[in-house]
Amino acid sequence: MGIIIILSLILIGVVIVQIARITELAGTLRGEEEAMMDSNRRNGAYMVIFVVGFLIFCVISAMYYKNWMLGYGPHISASEHGLALDSLFDTTLFFTGIVFVLTQILLFWYAYKYQYKPGRKVLFLAHDTRLELIWTAIPVIVMSFLVVKGLVVWNEAMADTNDEYIEIEAMGQQFNWLIRYPGADNRLGERNYKLFTASNPFGQDWNDTKNLDDFHPAEIVLPKGKKVRVRITSKDVLHNFDLPHFRVKMDAIPGLPTYFVFTPTTTTEEYRLRLKETPEYQALLDPIDPESPLLWEAFNYELACAELCGSGHYSMKRIVKIVEQEEYDAWAAAQQEQAWYPNNVKGKDEDPFKMSPEKARDLELMNRKKDFRMSINNAINAEKVEDRVFKLDYVKYQTGSSLLTEESSDELNNLVEALADFPNLSLELAGHTDNVGNPVNNQALSQKRAESVYTYLTSHGIASNRLKAVGYGDTQPVESNDTEEGRRKNRRTEARITSK
């Protein structure tokens, strides 16, 4: 068989050589110039036919694969900012598409139009200011428009707002993504690259008590409609954090933390139902296995690395699930049992609290005080009146009562100190409840709770004319009361700065 293949290749080569000789002989018989003109005519016609076929192929192939491409068919963006980003790509495609089509048509048409003819002379233009102005000014105008539109989209996507958000951390390494979530305190603890060990993959500083409830899940689960801020870092080489369906893409750079903010708008199940309506996704995932699921049934959002980070680059894949808020709350609550510190560090040599629970309590109070100071300073320095509010996160009451719990004194003592440091500061102490129960009773309870805080502060030396207690009941929720998590956030005590 090998000999036959080799002989066949030799025969093909001989045929090509003979055809070339015959063509050369025919040209000699007809005359060299006539043969060259005939060749030019043929090649010019072929080029025109090619460009027509090529452009038709581009249009037809784009229409054929429309339902597979991001931004088209069922693959509209699954995040809020993604729609603006897709619009920017469409605008760019419009202008570059015009240039692409025109340049291809002119390129191949000129090859036909200006083929060699006897007596034709080349026209040489040494300088044409008007022509140069046109082909310089038009790209400048178009590029300026695209750059400005791109900056507007970027600023909208990355806007720094005071909205509540979930913050998670993604760290790339060869060849995996490490994911970290905050615990019940909704705050990620400090970390240090010098603390990297096998039992501490993020280099978390266990002296920072915010780290003690952080957990490292095997999958990424996020709630629909909630703003998410992702800290993006790398442990070794350059990676890229890519969530294509959410139009999120950001480099993970060693030593230079980056971030991205986005809000998911479509759950995984909703996206699957969208694909279900598309004929292309009715095919089997594995064509040779009749028992395999259909493409739309097997769909999942994915986190990938969009940087060539090494030979195992292809394996940097994580499943991302977008769910409703209630399902997310249940998942996050279950993950608390898998918090990294109690399951992997507590009681071991690297545990800084192994021999001193008192130290753990002192550090926690110190961190709380630091966070409180930051919160009140932000409120004092806020430009807008509506932003001059800070929460008293650790002020708690006995269930159904206005009696303060014992641990509330730590937070209130921080407030006493702050009021002593800012003698011109006056506050409105606001009590809020969820909507469970009678609205009248809720308002009365919130008023009594605000008065309990008022009484504590005045009994510790704060002048009564600097304080005012107001109960708002359930009239000013910050979250929906349809979920337990939302109701928990609505039950709160706040302080609003009335003068400073």
Image (tube, rainbow, N blue to C red):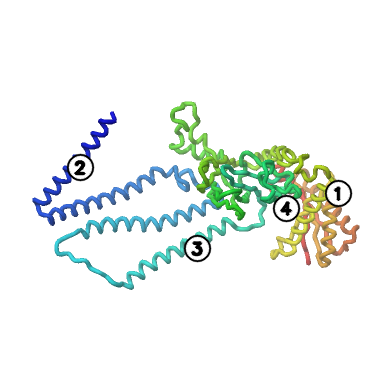
Q: Reading the chain from its start, which is encountered first: label 3 or label 4?
A: 3
Amino acid type, callout 1: Leu
In the image, taking residue 269 as reference, residue 195 lies left or right, namely right
Q: Residue at x 35, y 68 (%)?
A: 134
Question: Where does the image place residue 21, in percent across and percent down from the top left?
Answer: 15, 46
Q: Is residue 1 above or below residue 108?
A: above
In 3D space, how far apart are the residues under numbered discs 2 and 3 (Cα atoms)?
A: 56 Å
Q: Are marks 1 and 2 in contact (CB under 8 Å)?
A: no
Label 2: few (<14), some (14–19) or many (≥20) C-alpha neighbours in 10 Å: few
- Residue highlighted by disc 3: 148
Amino acid type, callout 2: Ile
In 3D space, how far apart are the residues under numbered discs 1 and 4 (Cα atoms)?
A: 22 Å
- Residue highlighted by disc 2: 16
In the image, taking residue 486 as reference, residue 462 lies left or right, namely right
Observer-side mark, 3 or 1, equals: 3
Question: Where does the image place residue 93, in percent across and percent down from the top left?
Answer: 42, 55
In 3D space, how far apart are the residues under numbered discs 1 and 2 (Cα atoms)?
A: 97 Å
Q: Reading the chain from its start, which is encountered first: label 1 or label 2?
A: 2
In the image, taking residue 477 as reference, residue 458 lies left or right, namely right
- Residue highlighted by disc 4: 476
Q: Tell me the quarter of the image containing the N terminus.
A: top left
Amino acid type, callout 4: Gln
In 3D space, how far apart are the residues under numbered discs 3 and 1 (Cα atoms)?
A: 54 Å
